[in-house]
Image (cartoon, rainbow, N blue to C red):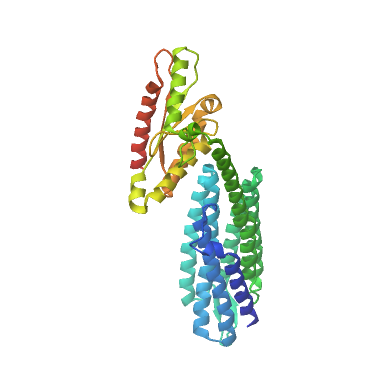
Amino acid sequence: MVYASFGIVAFLVVIIINYEVLNPRVDHRYFIAFEEYRRFLLSVLLFIALDFMWGILDAKEIMFWLYVDTVIYFLSMSLTVILWTQYVIKLLNNNNNNNKWFEVLINFLCQIYAIYIIIILIINFYKPIIFSYDTKYEFTSGTARLITYEIQIGFFLLVAIYTLLQGGKRKDREGWRYLAIGVFGIEQLICIGIQMYYWVVPVYTIGCLIGTCTLHTFVFEDRKVEYQEKLEKLLEINKKQKEEIGSAKQVAYRDPLTGVKSKNAYVEAVEKLNDSIKKEIITDLGIMVFDLNDLKTVNDTLGHEAGDQYIKDGCMMICNKFAHSPVFRIGGDEFTVILQGSDFNNREGLISEFENEVEENLKSNKVVVASGLGIYIPDKDKYVDDIFERADKKMYERKKSLKEMK
């Protein structure tokens, strides 16, 4: 029963510490790869529950259920390893698409390992290659058990080292979070190594307790704090913007829903640009046109409040990417950006990053924004509308291609 008591305490502590992760009503937008992390955490809870049940059944000497629990124990332990790797590769790919090869490799190895563990557990029913119990309910370890643990150690070592290397390349807070995740992997492989030879002590359960608490503090909570800090900055910006629109003119030139410049402001800006074109004092100029996909569907299915939030999220994407250019809301779900200066010079990179984010959002059912760029052509374009028409045409082509990608 002493063995079981460790598991019961660990089970309760993991639930209490990770209440926010397990609660589906809590907002988790600030947590990258949340669903993968949540599935991993649930697998940990399943493993711990089976571990302390093993202690109870062993003490009560209930052979049939003791054997069943041990089989599921090995399955759930393997599941924690697989789901942890899935969480890590999802996290890495969210921040760096160059890690695609690593995802393919790990997924392949996970599939092979899953097939392996099922096969040896089936064989164990007929020939005890993993474990067995004698008439005195004594546990006997088989060769396949040690091999299985060695494979798990290999998984943790491979993913942990790769994560630590990726964390070492970054100098931001995300890099420190990578290091915490890598340390978790090292800690888990050490626990498995000890568990291989000391099965009478719930070492892996203790490791899961320490590891998940580490992830909660240095990854989940740290990202939550960072998100709150960004939110406070946005609120401060919003507060300053509200202070700036004290006059009637400023109110007319500011979109009330998103806080960006309104159609009135765009009309005035176009008049100035047309004058510059006429006087031939302008050279570098780009007009980007944006349109939100599926706004009508959001309004019809989720309501106009959700539709307003959808517009805000789309606007935020545009503002974050083209931070040095004026953004205008010229229609219900239509936005325009006037590219000059550094944003114009860096337009190819900015547009590429924006399109990558849009395609990622398409996969995860987030806001999808179609865009098109028109570049000013001297001696051809007499008005901004000439540039706008080309951008608008490209935007509709992009809009069509995004719908075909669904």
The vertical placement of 369 against 375, above or below, is below
Question: Residue 255, percent across and down?
Answer: 46, 37
Is residue 178 something that shows in the picture? yes
Residue occupying image coordinates x 46% and y 67%: 119
Question: Residue 34, percent across and down?
Answer: 52, 56
Check the picture and name the quadrant holding the N terminus.
bottom right
Q: Quadrant of residue 391?
A: top left
The vertical placement of 272 against 58, above or below, is above
Check the picture and name the quadrant holding the C terminus.
top left
Is residue 78 something that shows in the picture? no
Residue occupying image coordinates x 55% and y 82%: 133
Question: Residue 67, percent across and down?
Answer: 51, 80
The vertical placement of 178 against 239, above or below, is below
Question: Residue 328, percent across and down?
Answer: 45, 33
Q: Quadrant of residue 371?
A: top left
Q: Quadrant of residue 195?
A: bottom right
